[in-house]
Amino acid sequence: MNPAAQIDLYCERTDWSFWSEPLNALTNLAFLLAAALIVARVRRQEGRLPWDAGVLAGLTALVGVGSFLFHTFATVWGAWLDVAFIAAFVYFFLARFLARIGGLSRIAILGGLVGYWVLERVVLAMFPTGTLAGSIMYLPALATLAAMAMFAWRRQSPAAARLAAAAAVFVVGLALRTSDPVVCAAWPAGTHFVWHCLSAWTLYLATMSLFATRRTRG
């Protein structure tokens, strides 16, 4: 596939100009805000910034950067960056969850990452790429996030509440992402931009769950 080929996936886009998706582009600032909040709140809570919190904050910001490039240039290479940064966050977060909450060894963590990769491949093989307006690619992440919340709850971990909240927000966000092409006729701006805001909130809640204590809230 030609990396420079252009892609029109969202109802807000009406031409190939850079700012044809203003809401979809500018709402990626939510990821930068989420990254800043992660750094500020974890540092205040921990008295320092743990290395993995810094990495997760950086990856959260990169998700916003990748999405911004995709919704402005609307090219195949922009889509690749968008997907790559999201995948980097998902896999790194899963690894840190298995280490911090699960208390697993490095070998077991690697096994968990391989298992998640297999889950993704199975789901994508079962359904066409465009299923649910492309939202099918996020179902493994949603299922895993819900499983994390259940695991943390069974362990009576303070991470459980934030993980459950992250999963709930993610569900709403996915519903709005999926409905974007459906509402075009009635609402030309679409709903994809709200997905960005809710996704940023999801990444914030998920990251903060790793540093939750029984005294902290929100």
Image (spheres, rainbow, N blue to C red):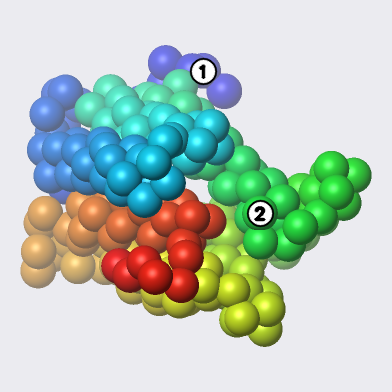
Amino acid on which the number 2 mark rests in the picture: Arg
To which residue does mark 2 refer? 100
- Counting from the top left corner in percent of width and height, residue 56 is at 48, 39
Label 1 residue SS: loop
Depth order, front residue of 192/149? 149
Q: Residue at x 62, y 69 (%)?
A: 148
The local crowd at label 1, few if under 14, some if 14 to 19, many if 20 or more residues have their Cα within 10 Å, is few
**What is the quadrant of the N terminus in the image?**
top right
- Counting from the top left corner in percent of width and height, residue 186 is at 9, 69
Depth order, front residue of 116/124? 116
Looking at the image, residue 139 sits to the left or right of residue 169; the answer is right
Q: Between disc 2 and disc 1, whose residue precedes?
A: 1
- Counting from the top left corner in percent of width and height, residue 187 is at 9, 64
Q: Is residue 175 above or below residue 125?
A: below
Q: Quadrant of residue 170?
A: bottom left
Looking at the image, residue 76 sits to the left or right of residue 51; the answer is left
Depth order, front residue of 64/179? 64
Amino acid on which the number 1 mark rests in the picture: Asn
Depth order, front residue of 99/133? 99
